[in-house]
Image (spheres, coloured by chain):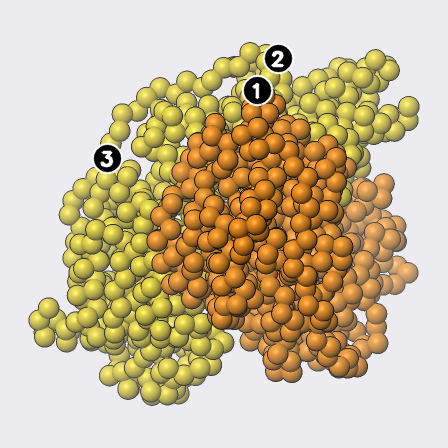
Chain colours: A yellow, B orange
Amino acid sequence: MTVQALDSIHELAQQLRVDSIRCSTSAGSGHPTSSMSAADLMAVLMARHLRYDWQQPDNPANDHLIFSKGHASPLLYSMFKAAGVVSDDDLINRYRRFGSVLEGHPTPVLPWVDVATGSLGQGLPDGVGVALAGRYLDELPYHVWVLCGDSEMAEGSMWEAFDKASYYQLSNLTAIVDVNRLGQRGPTELGWDLESYVRRVEGFGCHAIPIDGHDLGEIDKALGHAADADRPTVILARTRKGRGFSEVEDREDWHGKPLPPEMAERAIVELGGERHVTVSGPQPEPGTPKQRPVGEVSLPRYELGGKVPTRLAFGQALAAIGARPDVVALDGEVGNSTHAEEFLKKYPERYFEMFIAEQQLVAAAVGMSVRGYVPFAATFAAFFSRAYDFIRMSAISQANIRLSGSHAGVEIGADGPSQMALEDLAMMRAVEGSTVLYPSDATSAAALVQEMAERTGVVYMRTTRGAYPVLYGPDEAFPVGGAKVVRSSPDDQVTLIGAGVTLHNCLAAADRLASEGIQARVVDLYSVKPVDTRTLLEAAAATGDRLVVVEDHYPAGGIGGAVLEALSDAGHPVLISHLAVRSLPGSGTPAELMQAAGISVDHVVEAARQRVGA
Amino acid sequence: MTVQALDSIHELAQQLRVDSIRCSTSAGSGHPTSSMSAADLMAVLMARHLRYDWQQPDNPANDHLIFSKGHASPLLYSMFKAAGVVSDDDLINRYRRFGSVLEGHPTPVLPWVDVATGSLGQGLPDGVGVALAGRYLDELPYHVWVLCGDSEMAEGSMWEAFDKASYYQLSNLTAIVDVNRLGQRGPTELGWDLESYVRRVEGFGCHAIPIDGHDLGEIDKALGHAADADRPTVILARTRKGRGFSEVEDREDWHGKPLPPEMAERAIVELGGERHVTVSGPQPEPGTPKQRPVGEVSLPRYELGGKVPTRLAFGQALAAIGARPDVVALDGEVGNSTHAEEFLKKYPERYFEMFIAEQQLVAAAVGMSVRGYVPFAATFAAFFSRAYDFIRMSAISQANIRLSGSHAGVEIGADGPSQMALEDLAMMRAVEGSTVLYPSDATSAAALVQEMAERTGVVYMRTTRGAYPVLYGPDEAFPVGGAKVVRSSPDDQVTLIGAGVTLHNCLAAADRLASEGIQARVVDLYSVKPVDTRTLLEAAAATGDRLVVVEDHYPAGGIGGAVLEALSDAGHPVLISHLAVRSLPGSGTPAELMQAAGISVDHVVEAARQRVGA
């Protein structure tokens, strides 16, 4: 690195600081001091190491840059200005404004942003996903650079990421930790104790490089090492928050606060004034992702009446759609329970074992979605609650991820409530733009797996532990947003609505009711979100608004909520008899637990009788 | 340790193995091999180190024993038999049976169990909470022993726990990691690489002791060291899964599987047959928790019309009820945003900074609840999604925790969607036995903080970032499960239902509607769960079933869902005009974002007009 280069990079760094101040002061909010600490790091990175074609952000050979400390958006957007892709006017006058793509925290509404960040501890796990794709799927030499904050090193998810980065030997991943020692409301746990960070990071199998984060030469050397490393690298950069402006540098109580205009003026003077340097850093070597042969998808076919768990059908269908080379499977070390291992058997090179680390499981799927893959992540449905913040953020990231949760509800039996998903439908329905599926038989489960692959956003499927009869012939279609009327007659008096195991209870109840002379329509609500309002309205109309909804889920926000919300939205509010799990379950057989929860065949029969006044 | 003692402890360990096999074979499910690997560890612990009065589990001086690897319940319950508190008959014939307290995974329906486990990576963080209480609140010398699995070392939450244990110098905490190298479906990431575990654990500031987990002498020595350590200790015990029965020992594919009866017979023979030893280990030294003076709670009083953010009222009320010495506050390093720091200013000795580690934040609250404290944990509402699995499990633990989430909804403005809680009401409502509160003004927020302290289970309060007028006089009561009719007349034509910021929009809308000659009733639904069905029914009756519900939350499962579910349950289904956030928001001012989301005053007015046909 020549002195000349050093000088110009210093100028760039000062510009990034000045612009971070200017845009946040203009917006009246934002995090200039958290940007200023990392400005030297990012200046060297973009000028000399980040191989990125700014004019073609979709160039598949580009490096990736993720701001895990998303609150440093002033710095990121100032880099975009320096790259010549955001105007100074937009930076200063549109940052954090309504309708602007320059949001308070970065999101992929910007073409140079891979994932939304701002919930700390997520950018690095997402970066692990991108790096996994680079090394094992794309087989391209792009490098993934993640700027991390020191505060977020307290998040367990960071350590899930370091662990998996090392396990999968992601030498194409570099975390740059901006150790400015100050969090939002005071000093961080470890302050400037780089030695402790080094011990932790090395303990997790990554290569740690402690540096002075304001020494451009040291930064350059560390980034050069990182690019050529044989292990994931973690650069631990000792920095000063608010670096470059003496009135705030290394001072508490300046987190997340723009400088008042008169202070900003003094700061800009101290930093050497406004500049409008543009940088053209290194370009990626041309390259395209590895192409794999496209096979023919042939879904498994199940015999009517045969007993097959939907979780097994999920696994078998996943293996079948693996003929598409963009389909990838990940599991949280329970692949023999979720049956994701069916995919492993067929496509081991596209199966990623994430062990018991559900946050990283989901984040890896998000990172693979960034690279255009079609990831399916599986674990017990209950354990997706571990990754709910990641699922929520993945919607903001506009990621396309498919989640399959097995072992839903009290139906799982003896393992008890810790393993029972009883909140998952509410949790997943609440996510923006999500799809929530809950098949009742193997045929529909398999068909819906194929639908999932085509769907955008967060797409969730709930599967059941036990084996239940196949209800549908192999050529039946199950569009997302549909429902099946499994049983009906012109004389239906009441509609029984179920999904998953409770649909089988509804069918048995309908048989019993028929023997008593009560005709019941039965609806399979396999698409919980979006829900088939038309089928619900027709059923309500046909059966005098007598609806019974049965779900193996707590009562708030599940299938009952979905039905009530849909019918109210459609202008036809209906009273539902709502059978759901209303107290904490224990262990037992599935039958005992469904009986105790009030969602058994007996309960459906009784609810239906009451509704028809029998 | 005498040879005699060693011999008898070996007998105890063999009994624990035999009983683990017997009970799981009898139940037809369970995890005998995961129990057998840890039997030697637990035998030495209970015979020589665990100071526990089995006849008086509520003796406050007792040590605590937590099975973070909750699937080893056969081992735990076999220990209870050896302690003489569970009969052999119950162990063998009631394990995992319906209605039995010997559930598949341990829960506090058993008096010797502190917290529910079974979702991995939670027992240790919960144990950190208990140890924090021991050291800083109770000031009692009890020790917290946590049996961990090696698979769960992949969970980030474990590292949040080690980090906090070291930060808070919890020398009263010992993690005993059963490194049997086999997970559910194959080898763990690190196998028997104890050195890597040691590096990680030491890097996190804990004292690591690697041992042979089947050498009783080594175990005894390590446990002795741990009891006298000046730092948290982590015993890394190399063990063999299924230890003691040659047909399964250290073999794959035996996770979570009971031995078939004929194999069980052979195993029992190999283990030396059934035994019915009882143990009386060391007793706790008598002691009682530190008593602190009880002060008078005097809630803050706010002037009608003054503008106060509810998050500030939360903090001020929390500081006020701090006069009760059992109240404790914890925060995720955002105490100046949540205003939990108001408590810190007054009671620093009962304030616990958990930094950016939301899982440990909630787990610490759970642990303090175990010790009878009244913990309030605060962070941004959005970030409680990070801890959803912990919140779900805390309901199974029958813990009493209070959570305060600030910065809800699009109202937060420029920071953008990553910081906006828009799923929290659905997520919290779904939890079994939960309470969900959402005050609109400072008076009600303060009153509800006091209500929260009295409440059991998971109690959540959502607070708002911005300052809005005080609506209620200081002597108004806000019972949980109530609602306030803020505005009404005999001529009301429509009811506007809001909470938090949207209540203010409803009030402004009512003014505007009144100027058009439309009388609107306004309901403050501050208690979202349980919801005040009677007030809703009365409003519906009074206003011709014309209800408008406005919420700063995604549409599925929030306030709209709560209203629809309540009215359907009450037998009076009603159509609601449902204004909610229906697409991904960006940055902007609160007013701009509420306008864009369709929840502004304009939208309420328009929805009301449509309902009355104006």
Question: Quick one: label 1, few (<14), some, or many (20+) residues within 10 Å?
Answer: many
Q: Are marks 1 and 3 in contact (CB under 8 Å)?
A: no
Q: Quadrant of residue B88?
A: top right
B202 shown above or below A243 = above
Say whether residue A41 is left or right of residue A262: left
Q: Are marks 3 and 2 on the same chain?
A: yes
Question: Quick one: label 2, few (<14), some, or many (20+) residues within 10 Å?
Answer: few
The local secondary structure at tag 2 comes to loop
The local secondary structure at tag 1 comes to strand
The residue indicated by pointer 3 is A290
Q: Residue at x 39, y 62 (%)?
A: B202
Task: Tell me residue A76's x, y (percent).
Answer: 33, 64
Q: Nearer the viewer, residue B597 or B59?
A: B59
Q: Nearer the viewer, residue B614 or B293?
A: B293
Q: Report, in whole angstroms, how far the alpha carbon at label 1 lies from the one at label 3.
A: 36 Å
The residue indicated by pointer 2 is A305
Which mark, residue A308? 1
Q: Residue at x 47, y 56 (%)?
A: B235
Amino acid type assigned to the residue bearing label 3 in the image? Lys
